[in-house]
Amino acid sequence: MAGTAAVAAKEYGALDFRKAKKQFLEGPVKIEDLGYVPFPVKFLVPDFMIPCDLFVPVLAKGEELPTFVKVLDRGQLFSEERRFALKKQRVDMLYAEAGAAVDLYDYFTEILRAFSKDDVTPTWQKAQVLYNYGEFLAHLLFRDVHDGEVFEKTTQWADAVVGLIQREQAKVSVIYRLFSRNYETVNHSIQVALLAMAFCSYCGWRSEDTARLGVSGFYHDIGKIWVDKRILLDPSPLTREQFAHIRRHPQAAYDHLASMDWMNADQLAAVHEHHESMDGTGYPQGLKGADIHPYARVLHICDCFDALTTHRPYKKAVTPYKALKLMQSEMRLSFDRHLLYKFIQFLGS
């Protein structure tokens, strides 16, 4: 929690820090455990109403838990002036009460609905809102993989992404510029989903299949919830046992999602098979060639590309050009060669 709570050492001026209720828990806790969900300032869009009361955790001297102080009121019109005031106070992360999640869903939906009828707002700004919404949903997903409402909202999110790509003919450069270059499972899930949907649209897939694959991309790595985090963050080379442990994540994701009965058979296959290789050396089933679902072949390419081009604890990111060279030379037997060729064309577009 250190580093996320501001230290109340002085007056906060224009931000009007009023009394906020305290919630006490015993033992080490995260702020999210106190009944709040993170909502970064970057998610707020000027000229739209603030969706719910938003708080900053303030840690006073001598106290172990923060007081949540309300800094923005539900129904206020957000503006760049308010953003500047928050920035001046070094506030970049806000928190909403967990029960306000429905208001946050509705907030993004309202903005996207308005943008769909707006020919003035640049495409990249609309794409930014979609990325932010995806990030919000991904954080909720990795907090509770059993939440069916998150799945429902993710399906609507994927439909909105496909709509933006097709309606505004958004080029891959518009979407790729939003990507984080630091690997986190949350951002990776969003980026694989976005890449896959943009690529499938480029290939002329039906919008229904493109959106369904996008949802699979969003969920493809949830099996890592059951992977030891110490292994995922270890900068040293993996042992055989550690690698075997990590290789369980597609099966874990498949088993969970199949039990929840949210996805159709195509989507489940995409999640289950996204680490299968065309030459039969992949996992968890060792499938080969035509036995691998087309959805999974796309995810395999997008997953690998995003992994190569982002920084991880054990490796530095490579440029998109170098990533494609590696995929085309040293890793070519792993991918559907026709799809890889189209993917290279797609990124060049």
Image (cartoon, grey):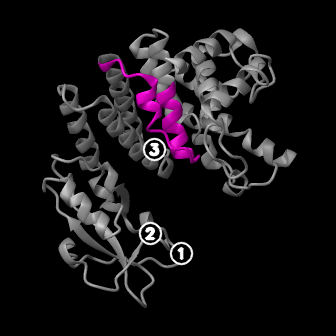
Residue 160: image location, x then y, percent: 33, 27
Earlier along the polypeptide chain: callout 2 or callout 1? 2
Mark 2: few/some/many CA within 10 Å (<14, 14-19, 20+) = some
Q: Is residue 263 visible?
A: no
Asked if residue 308 is positioned above or below residue 341 in the image, the reply reads below
Q: Is residue 193 on the magenta stretch?
A: yes
Asked if residue 98 is positioned above or below residue 295 in the image, the reply reads below
What's drawn in magenta, residue-wise?
168-195
Q: Residue at x 81, y 48 (%)?
A: 238
Asked where in the image residue 108 lies, by quadrant, the reply is: top left
Q: Residue at x 71, y 47 (%)?
A: 315
Mark 1: few/some/many CA within 10 Å (<14, 14-19, 20+) = few
Q: Could you tell me which secondary element the residue under label 3 belongs to?
A: helix
Q: Which residue in the protein does label 2 denote?
A: 4
Mark 3: few/some/many CA within 10 Å (<14, 14-19, 20+) = many
Q: Could you tell me which secondary element the residue under label 1 belongs to?
A: loop
Residue 127: image location, x then y, percent: 35, 33
Q: Is residue 318 on the magenta stretch?
A: no
Q: At label 1, which amino acid type do we have?
A: Pro
Q: Mark number for residue 70?
A: none
Q: Residue at x 74, y 38 (%)?
A: 247
Foreground residue, 242 or 25? Answer: 242
In the displayed structure image, the side of residue 24 where residue 348 appears, left or right: right
CA gap between label 2 and label 1 equals: 14 Å
Earlier along the polypeptide chain: callout 1 or callout 3? 1
In the displayed structure image, the side of residue 245 where residue 5 appears, left or right: left
Residue 191: image location, x then y, percent: 50, 35
Q: Which residue in the protein does label 1 denote?
A: 28
Q: Nearer the viewer, mark 1 or mark 3?
A: 3
